C-alpha cells in the first residue's frame, strides 16, 4: 500500500516586487487583507500581478515520499531558496498549497543565530534553542555534537575567531542532531573542507537510509548525485523538468549549453586573415550516422574551413564531463595532414566508445605540428559541442556501473589467478 | 555516532499535518490557535536561552559588566534630586520628599518605555535570524522582556534604599506595586507590539519613537504635576492612572486607584492580546521584506 507523501506541493506560486518601496506598501496591504477572513480568498485574487511585481515561483507542484531525496537545481535567481523558505514556513505562498506530514528541519544559512562573542560550546545551546530544543534536551547530546564538529579545542574559542568552514561545522553538527522527518538543506557544504563535506554526505545518506527525507539545493553535481535520487529543475520560478537527479543535471547542463551557444554562435564562424582556419562542427556518430551508443563503434568527424592550403596540420578532440569541469579523455593526432583551401573533413574511428550513457561536452583543436601553434579551436572561447551517448542494452552490470556514477569503461582482459 | 530514532516507511506520521496556503490564517482559526500553542511550548526555552546570552554577552563585552545596568538609573536619580533641591518644580504632594517622588515616577516610566521599545528593538536586532530561521519571534520579545524585568528589579532595589534613606513609612498597599509595574509593562508591550509590524517595514517608526516618547514624558506626571492648563491632556493620557496609582500604592498607601485605572488596565490587556495576534498574522509578510 502506498503511504501518503511526507510533502506535497500543489501549484505553488509566490510573487515579489522589483521596487522596494512598493514591496513595503504591498506588505501593508497583504497584512490588511489577511485581517479580513470573510473577504476574497487569496487564491482567487493572488493570481494578479500588481505593478512592478513578478512571479518568483509559479505553478510548482511535486511530492516527496519518506526516505526519498530531491535535488532542486537551477541558476541563481531561479527560485530555489524561495521554494525552501516557503517549505520551511518562513514565507507564505500567494497561490497554491504545501502539505507536510511531520517535523521539518532546515539547514539554511548556517551562520545565523550564532553569537560571535560566545564560545562554540555556548553557541550550541543558543542555536539548538533557536531550532526548538530545550537546554535539557541538548545537554546529553553536547559531547556527540562537539565530536561531530571535529573542532577539538577550538570549541571553547569565541565564534568570532572561527573561519566560515568552522562555523558551518558547528551549525551543521547541531542541526544534524535534531532528527526531523524532512530536512531542507540549502548550499551549506560549499564552505566546508573535504573532510566536512564527506561527513555531511555520509550523515545525509545515513539519515535517508533511516527513513528521513531530504530536499537539497546545491550547485555541486557530486553532492547532488551522492545524496539525491530525484531532481527538479527550476528556471525563472517554474519547473522545467522533473526526473532522476542525473537526468535533471543532464537537462540543466544542456540548457546552459544552449544558452551559451545562442550567445556566441556568430562570432566563431567568420573566416578572415586573422582567422585562417575555422572549425565548423565536431560530431561523434556511428558510420551510418545514427546516435553513438555506449561501447559501440563510432566515427569522430571534425569539419573545418581554411582560407588557404595549410601543410603540417594536426588535430585533437577532448571529451569533457557534462558540467564542463573535468576532461575525461582526449586524442591527439600528430600525423601531419594538409588542409586544402575551403571545406575539410577530418575523421577518425573509435572501435569501442568507452563512455557510459549520458551527456558529455566535446572540444577540439586544429594545430600546426612543428610549432604546436593552435590554428583553430572549438569549445574553449565558444560553446562546446554536445554529445549524448545512448545506452546499448540494459544489464545488471551496467546498472551497477551507473550506480557508482562511473564515466568510462575500461577494456579489460581478465586472466585467471596464478 | 549519531543517536537517532529508527524510522521506517510504516511509521505513522508524527504530529498534525502542516499546511501552508495563500489563505488568511483567520479562515482556519483552529489551526491558527494550534500554531500559537505549539510555538508557546518553545518560547520559554528559546527566550530564556536568548536572555542568558544577552546577559553573558553584556558581561563579556563590558569591563564593568553589571555596573552599566546600575549606573544610568543612579545618575538620573542624582540629577533629579539635585534639581529638586533647587526647587524648580512645584505642585508636588508636600508629604512626599521631592527626590522620592521623582525617582519613583522616573523608574516606573522607564519600565513602561523599555517595554514599549522592547518588541521593535529585539526584532530589529534579530532581523538576520528571523529572516532565515523558523523560530517563534515571541522568543526574542520574551528575552527582551527578561531584560526589562531585570532592569526594573535593579531599579526597585535602588528605590528601596532611597525609601529607607528618607524614612518613608511602609504601607500594606506596597504588595500591589508589582501589579502596577506589571500593568505598565503590559501596556508598553501592547503598544510596542502594535508598532512592530509597521516598524519592521518602515524605519520611520524607530525615528519617530524617541520624539513621541519625549513629548509623552512631558504630559505625564513623572517628575512634576503638569499645570492645570494641560489637564485635559493628562486626563486622556492612559499612562497617568497606571503610574499615579502605582506611585500612591508605594508612597501614600492610598488603595483606591485614580480615575480611569480599571479602563486602562482592561484596555492594556486587550491591546497586548490583539496587537500580538496582529503581529502573528503579519509575520510571513514581514519576513519576505526583511
Image: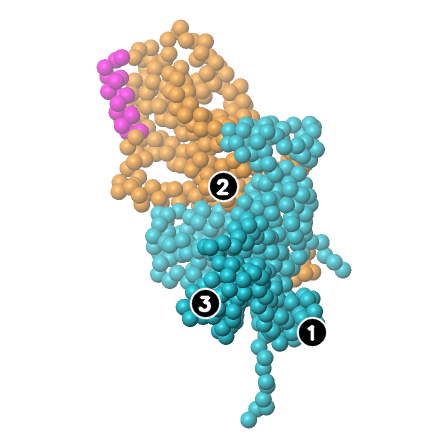
Chain colours: A cyan, B orange
User: Is-magenta flag for residue A255?
Assistant: no
Q: Callout 3: 10 Å neighbours few (<14), some, many (20+)? A: some
Residue farthest toward the bottom in the current orientation of the protein: A418
Relative to A106, does residue A362 appear above or below in the rendering? Answer: below
Query: Viewer-proximal residue, A158 or A359?
Result: A359
Query: Viewer-proximal residue, A141 or A230?
Result: A230
Front: mark 1 or 2: 1
- Looking at the rendering, the stretch of residues picked out in magenta corresponds to B73-88
Marking on residue A368:
3
Marking on residue A395:
1
Q: Residue at x 59, y 66 (%)?
A: A345
Tell me the element at label 1: loop
Instruction: Locate residue A191, reporting x and y percent.
Output: 44, 56
Front: mark 3 or 2: 3
Q: Is the Cβ of the residue at disc 1 closer than 8 Å to that at disc 2?
A: no
Q: In the shown orientation, is residue A115 left or right of residue A136?
A: left
Q: In the picture, residue B29 is in which quadrant?
A: top right
Q: Residue at x 37, y 12 (%)?
A: B226
Q: Is the Cβ of the residue at disc 3 closer than 8 Å to that at disc 1?
A: no
Q: CA distance from mark 1 to mark 2?
A: 51 Å
Q: Tell me, yes or no, whether dots 3 and 2 are on the same chain.
A: no
Amino acid at each position: 500500500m502506498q503511504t501518503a507523501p511526507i510533502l506535497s506541493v500543489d501549484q505553488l506560486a509566490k510573487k515579489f516586487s522589483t521596487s522596494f518601496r512598493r514591496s513595503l506598501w504591498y506588505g501593508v496591504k497583504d497584512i490588511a487583507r489577511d485581517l479580513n477572513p470573510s473577504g476574497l480568498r487569496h487564491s482567487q485574487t493572488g493570481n494578479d500581478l500588481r505593478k512592478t511585481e513578478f512571479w518568483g515561483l509559479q505553478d510548482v507542484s511535486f511530492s516527496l515520499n519518506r526516505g526519498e531525496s530531491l535535488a532542486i537545481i537551477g541558476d541563481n535567481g531561479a527560485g530555489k531558496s524561495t521554494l525552501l523558505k516557503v517549505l520551511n514556513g518562513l514565507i507564505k505562498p500567494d497561490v497554491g498549497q504545501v502539505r507536510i506530514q511531520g517535523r521539518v528541519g532546515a539547514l539554511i544559512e548556517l551562520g545565523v543565530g550564532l553569537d560571535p562573542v560566545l564560545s562554540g560550546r555556548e553557541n550550541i545551546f543558543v542555536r539548538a534553542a533557536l531550532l526548538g530544543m530545550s537546554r535539557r534536551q541538548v545537554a546529553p547530546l553536547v559531547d556527540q555534537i562537539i565530536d561531530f564538529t571535529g573542532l577539538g579545542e577550538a570549541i571553547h574559542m569565541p565564534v568570532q575567531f572561527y573561519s566560515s568552514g568552522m562555523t558551518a561545522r558547528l551549525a551543521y553538527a547541531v542541526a544534524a542532531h535534531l532528527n526531523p522527518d524532512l530536512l531542507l538543506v540549502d548550499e551549506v557544504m560549499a564552505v566546508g573542507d573535504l573532510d566536512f563535506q564527506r561527513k555531511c554526505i555520509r550523515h545525509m545518506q545515513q539519515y535517508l537510509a533511516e527513513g528521513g527525507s531530504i530536499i537539497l539545493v546545491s550547485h555541486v553535481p557530486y553532492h547532488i548525485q551522492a545524496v539525491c535520487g530525484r531532481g527538479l529543475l527550476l528556471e525563472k520560478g517554474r519547473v522545467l523538468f522533473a526526473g532522476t537527479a542525473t537526468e535533471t543535471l543532464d537537462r540543466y547542463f544542456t540548457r546552459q549549453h544552449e544558452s551559451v551557444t545562442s550567445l556566441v554562435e556568430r562570432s566563431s564562424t567568420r573566416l578572415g586573415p586573422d582567422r585562417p582556419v575555422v572549425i565548423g562542427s565536431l560530431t561523434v556518430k556511428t558510420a551510418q550516422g545514427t546516435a553513438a551508443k555506449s561501447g559501440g563503434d563510432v566515427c569522430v568527424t571534425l569539419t573545418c574551413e581554411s582560407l588557404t592550403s595549410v601543410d603540417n596540420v594536426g588535430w585533437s578532440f577532448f571529451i569533457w564531463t557534462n558540467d564542463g569541469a573535468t576532461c575525461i579523455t582526449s586524442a591527439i593526432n600528430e600525423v601531419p595532414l594538409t588542409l586544402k583551401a575551403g571545406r575539410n573533413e577530418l575523421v577518425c574511428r573509435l572501435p569501442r566508445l568507452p563512455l557510459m550513457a549520458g551527456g558529455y561536452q566535446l572540444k577540439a583543436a586544429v594545430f600546426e605540428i612543428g610549432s604546436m601553434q593552435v590554428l583553430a579551436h572549438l569549445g574553449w572561447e565558444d560553446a562546446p559541442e554536445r554529445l549524448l551517448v545512448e545506452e546499448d542494452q540494459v544489464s545488471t552490470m551496467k546498472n551497477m556501473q551507473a550506480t557508482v556514477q562511473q564515466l568510462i569503461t575500461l577494456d579489460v582482459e581478465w586472466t585467471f589467478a596464478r | 555516532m549519531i543517536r537517532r530514532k529508527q524510522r521506517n516507511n510504516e511509521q505513522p506520521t508524527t504530529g498534525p499535518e502542516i499546511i501552508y496556503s495563500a489563505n488568511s490564517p483567520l479562515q482556519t482559526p483552529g489551526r491558527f490557535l494550534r500554531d500559537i500553542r505549539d510555538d508557546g511550548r518553545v518560547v520559554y526555552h528559546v527566550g530564556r536561552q536568548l536572555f542568558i546570552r544577552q546577559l553573558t554577552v553584556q558581561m563579556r563585552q563590558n569591563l564593568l559588566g553589571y555596573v552599566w545596568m546600575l549606573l544610568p538609573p543612579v545618575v538620573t536619580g542624582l540629577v533629579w534630586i539635585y534639581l529638586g533641591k533647587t526647587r524648580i518644580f512645584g505642585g508636588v504632594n508636600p508629604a512626599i520628599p521631592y527626590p522620592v517622588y521623582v525617582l519613583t515616577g522616573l523608574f516606573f516610566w522607564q519600565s513602561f518605555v523599555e517595554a514599549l521599545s522592547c518588541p521593535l528593538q529585539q526584532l530589529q536586532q534579530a532581523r538576520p535570524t528571523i529572516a532565515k530561521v523558523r523560530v517563534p519571534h515571541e522568543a526574542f520579545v520574551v528575552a527582551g522582556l527578561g531584560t526589562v524585568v531585570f532592569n526594573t528589579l535593579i531599579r526597585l532595589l535602588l528605590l528601596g534604599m532611597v525609601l529607607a534613606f528618607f524614612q518613608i513609612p511602609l504601607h500594606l498597599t506596597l504588595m500591589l506595586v508589582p501589579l502596577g509595574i506589571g500593568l505598565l509593562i503590559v501596556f508598553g508591550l501592547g503598544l510596542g507590539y502594535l508598532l512592530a509590524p509597521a516598524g519592521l517595514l518602515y524605519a520611520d517608526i524607530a525615528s519617530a519613537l524617541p520624539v513621541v516618547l519625549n513629548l509623552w514624558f512631558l504630559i505625564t506626571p513623572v517628575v512634576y504635576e503638569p499645570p492645570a492648563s494641560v489637564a485635559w491632556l493628562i486626563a486622556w493620557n492612559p499612562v497617568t492612572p497606571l503610574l499615579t496609582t502605582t506611585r500612591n500604592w508605594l508612597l501614600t498607601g492610598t488603595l483606591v486607584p485614580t480615575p480611569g485605572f480599571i479602563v486602562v488596565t482592561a484596555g492594556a490587556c486587550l491591546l497586548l492580546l490583539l496587537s500580538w495576534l496582529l503581529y502573528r498574522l503579519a509575520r510571513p509578510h514581514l519576513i519576505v521584506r526583511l
